[in-house]
Image (cartoon, rainbow, N blue to C red):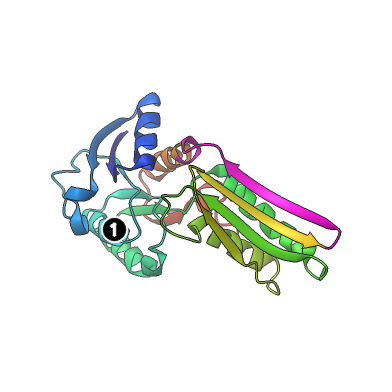
Amino acid sequence: MNLALVGDGKMSRAIAHLALERGHVVSTVVTRGENQGGAALTRDRLGGVDVVLEFTRPEAAPGNLLALARLGMPVISGTTGWQSRLEEITVAITAGGGALLHSPNFSVGVQLFLRGARDLARRFAGQPPFAEFVVETHHAAKRDAPSGTALALQEALRTGDPAREFAITSIRGGHVPGMHEVVFDAPFETVRLQHVARGRQVFAAGALAAAEWIRGKHGVFTFDQMLFGEEP
């Protein structure tokens, strides 16, 4: 595939490295400095590109996605913090005949973790001795807190047990790619369910799998739908 990367941060560099290993071509990398409001996302710049991968910042993503929607491009977005505008962007994607697959986390393990957490919450429903909470830890440069994955985890847990809050504690420090943990704590015992990412390569692999999957499709999808279909 011919790929375009929107964003030149650590995640985009991990995707570019793995894409080359897998025989894909990165045709262009659109940097933040040249792309205010999606201005660099033009038909001339993206001619011949099969799929665009957008990993930028929450404030930049809506403009990027709307610009790409007007071009009818297939897009993979791993940027978090813009989902309040999902309805607007969905309308634009549909009108432009393109496709978007978005996710706060492109780890297959995380998607399985979310389902396991939902099921665990169901098991702990009606067990008041156990207090519940979520802890998420990321590197010092991560801008959003809680993370998009932590919010998805909280939603999954509340689906399993709507009576519980599942408050989130966010830690930012060091170089941690990502750790999410669900804790049920009672006076004499503790139960933990944890996912730890050991490097950005896991997210890059998932994003590239999504790029391979989305070619020829139209509409708006999630990584969960790609992996498991429409089943919640």
61 over 46 or under it: above or below: below
Which residue shows up at 54% across the image and 55% down it?
171
Which residue shows up at 19% across the image and 56% down it?
36
Which residue shows up at 78% across the image and 63% down it?
124
Q: Is residue 41 visible?
A: no
Q: Is residue 190 left or right of residue 43?
A: right
Q: Magenta residues, as a range? A: 187-203
Q: Quadrant of the N terminus?
A: top left
Identify the image quadrant of residue 84. Answer: bottom left
Identify the image quadrant of residue 128. Answer: bottom right
Residue closest to the eye, 172 or 87: 172
Q: Quadrant of the C terminus?
A: bottom right
Q: Is residue 200 magenta?
A: yes
168 over 171 or under it: above or below: below
Which residue appears farthest toward the bottom when viewing the image? 163
Q: Position of residue 11 (x, y in %)?
A: 39, 41
Count numbered badges in the picture. 1
Query: Which residue matches tag 1?
Result: 60
Identify the image quadrant of residue 13. Answer: top left
Q: Position of residue 67 (x, y in %)?
A: 23, 57
Which residue appears farthest toward the left when viewing the image? 44
Residue closest to the eye, 200 or 186: 186
